Amino acid sequence: MEGFLKFVKKLGRLKVIEDPVDVELEIPHTAYVEIKKEKPNVLLFTNPVDGKKGYKYDIPVVMNVFAGFDITQKIFGKHPDEIAREIEKLFHLKPPSSFKEKIDTFKLLLKLKNVLPKRTKKEGLSQKIKITDQDIDLFKLPILKTWEQDGGRFITAGQVYTKSLDGKLQNLGLYRLQVVSKNEMLMHWQVHKDASHFFDQYYRAGKKMPVTVAVGGDPLYTWCGQAPLPYGIFEILLYGFIKQKNPVLVKSITNNIYIPEDADIVIEGEVDPSDFRPEGPFGDHTGYYTPVENFPVMKVKMITMKENPYYYATVVGKPPLEDKYMGWATERIFLPLLKTTAPDLVDYHMPENGVFHNLILAKIKPMYKGHAKQIMHAFWGVGQMSFVKHAVFVDSNAPDLTDYPEITKYILERLTEKSFLITEGIVDQLDHSSYEPLVGGKLGVDATGKSVEKTINTLPDKEILSKIKQLDSDITDLKQYMTQTPNPITVIKVKKTKPVKEIFKKIKSLKEHLRIVIFIDDQDNDLNNPYMLVWRITNNIDALKDVWIEEIWGIDATKKLEIDGYHRHWPDDVFCTKEVILRLKEKGLIDVDSNFLKKYQIIKEV
């Protein structure tokens, strides 16, 4: 981490904040605003404090490490597409037929020698300072509280190292940890995650599970923790392949788990399978608070650290955030692995305002009727791709998947009522829109066909709004998008007093003027902000219940209530605390105007 900070300082991309800044809300709010800029900086807070306790921490806080595409590429040492090409070459190895091919194959295989970790017997840099027994106090680490409704302070960039019960498999995951006492944390590994599968083994055996959490070190370790590798593959192997040098690991002091020897801070302990406690709420990467649920307790047995450590934290919430750039690298690097399941896949893209698992765009070479739908099923059966809620497929002639205006136009020019596949599957444990936890609707859209003719007569916004308001008084406003296409989108605001399906039935009488209608709540939505509308809509729909393909096509992206047959708790979306934002502006720590705050819905509009 120290080397990384020196590097970004030379690039002029390190912003050092020497003012006292509070670990509760102030530091994460500062980072949250900064990372949304076109060219964000890495932030180093040299004077973190706890204002309530009057405590000054002696460990600086680093945030926004993945600060942009350029910094992310520097962390990897090369463009992620280059790494993907190297992986693809390995998948297509064949016996060399010439001397040159033999040399190229030898060079490629030689790179694999760097994949395997070196396990040193020496003490690691991360073990210079040792804190044990009564001296353990997690509250002496500058752990942050990000959001006003958060249940406490959370480690947000902890590399969680675990082993299977038989010791044959090791895993690196990125899970949040809520601090609940001086020596206890709640381990939020979701039910689908590999570490949770290991935990199940210990639970059935009635044994405590050793866990080591590392913070900091080379930023690439943190990225490896979220890499969607198949079960049983130790994610740190990716580090060696990407960096072309063996990762050096050191044994934890209180267990047999190996971790990077250059981590900044290490927390060792064990998870008791008989001790579960309420965890949360927490404002997560979906931009919504996740509800309180029971998760296992990790009892800390030892804390070690470098002589001059840094505490690295990330902030999650509404896009765009640091995970935009981490996810970009993941998207590019894992394209070859997806192609092994779907060989006719050309490219794919996960827009950050679809928070990755809520929306994926894919370009394929369709070879036969129904090919796109076949690949949809393949996607929904592959590892973390199985969490994707909405997948849109286009053919190889489509515009670049990141050219949003053009790709949207291309898709809307090719939709018919036969373009849609609605099915059921697993969803992310963080998903709030499904009518039952862990299982929900999936929407696949096949836009690989020929363009279709426009058969409706679109009207100006004011005119169509007047007609629609006459049909139902819950409707307050609307805006039409892509009216030049055969399938224009009409986004309709409602003050909801009844199920939206009842409104939808009424406005079907205007089918000669409407094709796709999307209903959103009147509050906290801006009809002129398509970036945040995509975020809201993809978050809020369960395709099984909320998508209707009839004379017109309807989508209910409103907050669900008991009247909708929704019996779970619908969470709030996250907002920065307005008073904190104003205070940070007065201190000169953030320098954005009201338009910026509104664009990304940073504070709640009254």
Image (tube, rainbow, N blue to C red):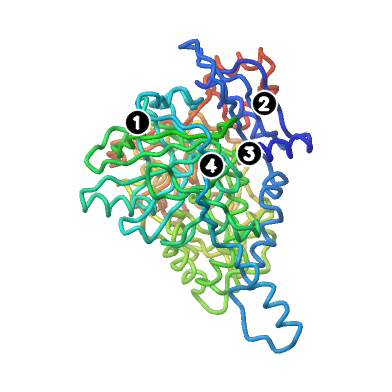
The 10 Å Cα crowd at callout 2, few under 14, some 14 to 19, many 20 or more, is few
Residue on which disc 2 sits: 595
Distance in Å between CA atoms under marks 2 and 4: 18 Å
Q: Distance from label 3 to label 2 (Cα)?
A: 34 Å
Numbered tag placed on residue 184 in the rendering: 1
Nearer-the-camera pick, 301 or 395: 301
The label number, if any, that marks residue 529 in the structure image:
none
Position of residue 97 relative to residue 360, above or below, is below
Q: Where residue 18 sits: x, y (%)?
A: 67, 19
Locate the N terminus by quadrant. Answer: top right
Sequence-wise, the earlier of marks 1 and 4 is 1
Is residue 579 shown above or below 32?
Answer: above
Badge nearest the viewer, 3 or 2:
3
What residue occupies the far front of the structure in this picture?
A: 122
The amino acid type found where label 4 is placed reads Trp
Mark nearer the N terminus (2 vs 1): 1
**Sooner in the amino-acid sequence: mark 1 or mark 3:** 3
Q: Secondary structure at mark 3?
A: loop
Q: Mark 2: which amino acid?
A: Asn
- Tell me if mark 3 has few (under 14), some (14-19) or many (20+) residues whose alpha carbon lies within 10 angstroms of its own: many
Circles 1 and 3: CB distance less than 8 Å?
Answer: no
**Mark 3 lies on residue:** 1
**Mark 1 residue crowding within 10 angstroms, few (<14) / some (14–19) / many (20+):** many
Q: Amino acid at mark 3?
A: Met
Residue 535, numbered label: 4
User: Marks 1 and 3, Cα distance to the nearest angstrom?
Assistant: 26 Å
Marks 2 and 3: in contact by CB < 8 Å?
no
In the rendered view, does 545 fall on the left or right side of 536? left
The residue sitting at 69% across, 46% down in the picture is 69
> x and y percent of residue 426 in the render?
36, 55
SS under mark 2: helix
Near-viewer residue (29 or 300): 300
